Image (spheres, rainbow, N blue to C red):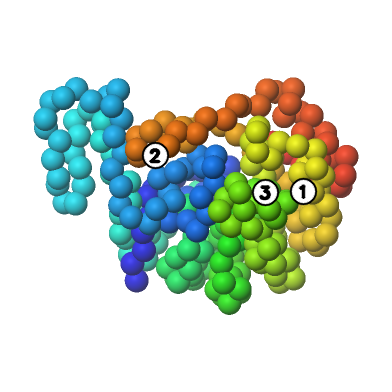
Amino acid sequence: MNGKIFDIQKFCTSDGPGIRTTVFFKGCPLHCLWCHNPESQSSERQVMFYADKCRGCGKCKNADDSFVCYNDARRVCGKTVTVDEVTREVLRDKVFYETSGGGVTLSGGEPLYQADFALEILKRARKNGIRTAIETCGFAPKEKLRQIAEYTDLFLFDVKETDAQLHQSFTGVDNVLILENLRLIDSLGKDIILRCPIVPGCNARTEHYKGIAELANSLASVKGIEIEPYHSLGEGKNVALGNESRVFRTLTAEEIEDILVTVRKYTDVPVSKS
């Protein structure tokens, strides 16, 4: 079986417990205004052009369906891979997973956008004794999610906005199905960490912080809440992709601490900065 990814990163320590290999899927049903991986939104292969690195040498060329750019001004984003290829990469670092309590994490983009491909990777990982995690926005058919959950140890579940109408305006979809799926995962007894991007000018407000806490309080399987302050990584990527550039303000250290304090005020679930 084939699927589309845009990266595989080794020795990751922020995508679940221990040392992990993170597989980044290409394609996402959401289009968040602040996305820090805008190259993940389209499922199609893209070329990112960094004008400041181009020397006009004219040596760019295609080679085996990939651009070769001697100054790294053009970068190909997206490739088709097999389950076998991904599994081989994941297995290379099995010893590190065993000694650190890590494993493989499927991220994106959105892994559930390619649910069958993701399922096969998870099955292979489980067969090889590797612990599994998925970072997901939760926007997927329930039957696919049930299948995925059977082979997933940990869900890193994105909570982008607790208000349905604002969620629609920020991401392109409302959060009704997303919250239904979150409760489904909870009912299956799967460990959940809520990942909450905070973006000034969008969801950086007290009502949302309180909503995050109340959501966590309503679920039995939430092990933690991770606050993810906005960072500007996606701004340069949008320019390189030829997209509209969206710029948001970054939070100060004092503002981040205030957010942590506010969320902790309304819940006993552990709250940390990601």
Residue 258 seen in this snapshot:
yes
Category of crowding for the residue at label 2, using alpha-carbon neighbours closer than 10 angstroms: few (below 14), some (14–19), many (at least 20): few
Category of crowding for the residue at label 1, using alpha-carbon neighbours closer than 10 angstroms: few (below 14), some (14–19), many (at least 20): many
Q: Quadrant of the C terminus?
A: top right
Is 24 rendered above or below residue 122? Answer: above
Q: Residue 226, percent across and down?
A: 69, 43
Q: Which mark is residue 212?
A: 1
Residue at image position (47%, 36%) is: 234
Is 59 rendered above or below residue 216? Answer: above
Q: Which residue is mark 3?
A: 166
Secondary structure type for disc 2:
loop
Secondary structure type for disc 3:
helix
Q: Are marks 2 and 1 in contact (CB under 8 Å)?
A: no
Residue at image position (31%, 30%) is: 50
Q: CA distance from mark 1 to mark 3?
A: 14 Å
Q: Residue 174, percent across and down?
A: 64, 58
Judged left or right of residue 213, residue 100 is left
Answer with the quarter of the image where residue 204 lies: top right
Mark with earlier residue (2, 1): 1
Answer with the quarter of the image where residue 137 lies: bottom right
Mark with earlier residue (1, 3): 3
